[in-house]
Image (tube, grey):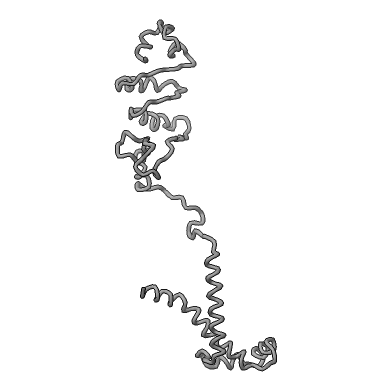
């Protein structure tokens, strides 16, 4: 409570100072000659009443001058208050963007404790395959877009590590036709049923009618 009162007093000191100074302006206006406001203002400027009022550095204690000082201080405080309420939201010191490099604690809530139950994104970053994590706000879409030029390691460093986790069923499009030979045996040893649909060489493809597999009986048996 005391801290709040102290803070309130400190924040309002500038308005007290402005009000105190304004009492001298009020005194100059009060003692100036003239029948109306414009004549009084002219008299204050021309006839030196302003200098006379400020000859004493202390605030004027005349009731009219005090009222003038309170009115000026309150008016300025009101203007500042209204401005603060209608102020735009500025992101100071991050005007050029708030992006930054992620830290381990940023990705940690999205990682499943079971290593195999994750999509491997990098050596240290993963995202859980669980579509309903304990905290729903950490649920994320599992689609991943990997962009890279030829030979940049998309297959070697993303596709293969995730395939060899052997944690889910997989539907894979392989234009090169290399992954079946490089990972097929690993899947078979882990109890997977592998089916191949080859639109380039139908002799190496599974068929709708298994009877047509007779020329490649051995191959089909291994894949089925």
Q: Residue 167's image quarter? A: top left
Nearest the viewer among 177 and 132 is 132
Query: x, y percentage for residue 79?
Result: 56, 72
Nearest the viewer among 186 and 117 is 117
Q: Is residue 197 left or right of residue 45?
A: left
Query: x, y percentage for residue 15?
Result: 50, 79
Count of numbered badges drawn on the protein: 0
Up-down relation of residue 2 to residue 51 (above or below) = above
Look at 47% across and 52% down and name the residue there: 98
Look at 54% across and 90% down and name the residue there: 63
Q: Is residue 53 left or right of residue 92?
A: right
Query: x, y percentage for residue 178?
Result: 41, 21
Up-down relation of residue 101 to residue 116 (above or below) = below
Query: x, y percentage for residue 68?
Result: 57, 85
Up-down relation of residue 40 to residue 77 (above or below) = below
Look at 54% across and 72% down and name the residue there: 80
Look at 68% across and 92% down and name the residue there: 34
Q: Quadrant of the N terminus?
A: bottom left
Q: Is residue 33 left or right of residue 27?
A: right
Nearest the viewer among 105 and 83 is 83
Q: Residue 155's image quarter? A: top left
């Amino acid at each position: 409570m005391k801290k709040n009162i102290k803070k309130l007093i400190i924040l309002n000191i500038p308005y007290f100072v402005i009000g105190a100074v304004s009492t001298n302006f009020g005194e100059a206006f009060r003692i100036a000659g003239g029948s109306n406001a414009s004549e009084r203002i002219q008299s204050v400027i021309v006839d030196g009443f302003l200098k006379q009022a400020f000859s004493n550095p202390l605030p004027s204690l005349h009731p009219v001058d005090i009222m003038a000082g309170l009115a000026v201080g309150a008016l300025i405080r009101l203007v500042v208050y209204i401005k603060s309420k209608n102020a735009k939201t500025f992101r100071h010191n991050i005007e050029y963007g708030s992006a930054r490099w992620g830290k381990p604690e940023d990705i940690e809530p999205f990682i499943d404790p079971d290593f195999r139950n994750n999509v491997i994104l990098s050596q240290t970053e993963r995202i859980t395959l669980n579509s309903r994590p304990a905290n729903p706000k950490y649920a994320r879409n599992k689609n991943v877009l990997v962009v890279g030029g030829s030979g940049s390691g998309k297959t070697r460093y993303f596709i293969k590590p995730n395939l060899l986790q052997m944690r889910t069923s997989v539907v894979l499009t392989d234009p090169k036709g290399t992954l079946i030979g490089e990972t097929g045996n690993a899947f078979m040893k882990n109890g997977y049923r592998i089916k191949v649909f080859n639109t380039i060489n139908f002799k190496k493809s599974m068929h709708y009618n298994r009877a047509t597999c007779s020329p490649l009986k051995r191959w089909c048996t291994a894949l089925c």
